Each structure stands twice: as structure tokens, then as C-alpha cells.
Image (cartoon, grey):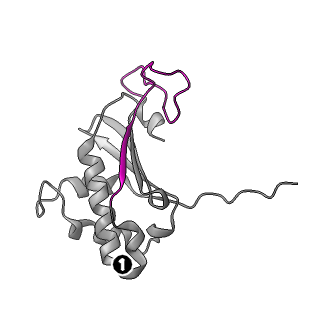
């Protein structure tokens, strides 16, 4: 008998969160923590295994960003293979700011994070891990983002 593994603890943000985070009129480069501070206030982000952020790109494409606090890792998944370094940077800054606002409890959210763009296989290695299927049409990105 093998004991069941613990299910991952996850948190899911609304698609409106990132729209507000990237479109602030108050902050530097569209980022202002004060505009989104209340969104994470009651969430125990430092205890989560994964935090999911749906990302809308130019009102025409959906992607998914996943923050893994215990691994200090932020990944951006795009079924068309796009890269979004600005999203990765903003989410890292958000996690830093959340950590700072939580004091001692938030120390695990501070510091440097690894950031990765994950897209469809590039043909380099057929067994390459952490790759996602390629979207072959212009309308199914919502399914891939989920």
C-alpha cells in the first residue's frame, strides 16, 4: 500500500487581475502594486504550490502564467509559442511586493525568481519535458490556456 500523495495547493486569480496589473496609470511601466494589493490580501500565497494567472494578450489570445512559490519559479505558457518577458517581470515584482507587505510570513516570496517561457515543442528533442501542444487554429487558445 502506498499512501496517497498530497494534492497540490493552488490558487486561481481572475483574468481581470493581470489586466489591472499591467495597465496601471499610476506606476512605472504600467505596474502599480497599490492597484492590485487587495487581490492577494486574504490569500495564503506563500503556502501555495501553484498560483494560476490567465493572461489575455491584445484582446485576441489567451495564455497562462503559473507561479510556483515553493520552487521560486514563474512560467508563462503560450500555445502559439509567444514569449512575454514583461509578464514574467511584472509577476515577479508582484510576488516581491506581496512578500514585503506580509512581513516575516512573506519572506519566501521575496528574492530572485526563475522565469521561463513555455511553448510548443520546437523539434529539438522529442522527449523534452514541460512543453505544451501547439495551437493550430486561431480560436482555441482558451482551451489550451486551461
Residue 132 lies in the magenta-colored region:
yes
Number of other residues with Cα within 10 Å of mark 1, as a class: few under 14, some 14 to 19, many 20 or more: some
Q: Secondary structure at mark 1?
A: loop
Number of numbered callouts drawn: 1
- Residue furthest right as drawn: 1
The picture quadrant where one finds residue 100 is bottom left
**In-front residue for pair 94/41:** 94
Determine the residue positioned at 47% across, 71% down: 44
Measuring 18% from the left and 54% from the top, which residue is drawn there? 23
Per the image, the residue denoted by label 1 is 102
Horizontal side, residue 95 vs residue 20: left or right: right
Look at the image and give the residue range highlighted in magenta: 112-139
x and y, in percent, of residue 132 in the image = 48, 31
Q: Residue at x 26, y 43 (%)?
A: 85
Looking at the rendering, which quadrant does residue 112 occupy?
A: bottom left
**Rendered position, 85 above or below 91:** above
Camera-side residue: 140 or 69? 69
Residue 91 is drawn in which quadrant?
bottom left
Residue 57 lies within the magenta run? no
Residue 121 on image: x %, y %: 45, 24
Q: Main secondary structure of the magenta part?
A: loop
The residue sitting at 21% across, 53% down in the picture is 22
- Which of the two residues, 145 or 70, is positioned nearer the viewer here? 70
Relative side of 100 to 123, left or right: left
Q: For the N terminus, which image quadrant?
A: bottom right
Vertical order, 52 against 84 (above or below): below
Is residue 77 toward the left or the right of residue 87 in the image? right
Picture coordinates of residue 6 (x, y %)? Answer: 68, 60
Amino acid at each position: 500500500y502506498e499512501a496517497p500523495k498530497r494534492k497540490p495547493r493552488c490558487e486561481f486569480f481572475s483574468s481581470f487581475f493581470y489586466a489591472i496589473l499591467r495597465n496601471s496609470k499610476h506606476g512605472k511601466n504600467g505596474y502599480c502594486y497599490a492597484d492590485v494589493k487587495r487581490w492577494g490580501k486574504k490569500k495564503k500565497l506563500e503556502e501555495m504550490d501553484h498560483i494560476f494567472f490567465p493572461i489575455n494578450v491584445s484582446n485576441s489570445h489567451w495564455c497562462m502564467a503559473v507561479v510556483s512559490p515553493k520552487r521560486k519559479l514563474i512560467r508563462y505558457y503560450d500555445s502559439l509559442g509567444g514569449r512575454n518577458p514583461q509578464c514574467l517581470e511584472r509577476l515577479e515584482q508582484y510576488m516581491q511586493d506581496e512578500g514585503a507587505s506580509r512581513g516575516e510570513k512573506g519572506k519566501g516570496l521575496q528574492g530572485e525568481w526563475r522565469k521561463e517561457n513555455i511553448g510548443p515543442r520546437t523539434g529539438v528533442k522529442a522527449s523534452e519535458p514541460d512543453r505544451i501542444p501547439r495551437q493550430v487554429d486561431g480560436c482555441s487558445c482558451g482551451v489550451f490556456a486551461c
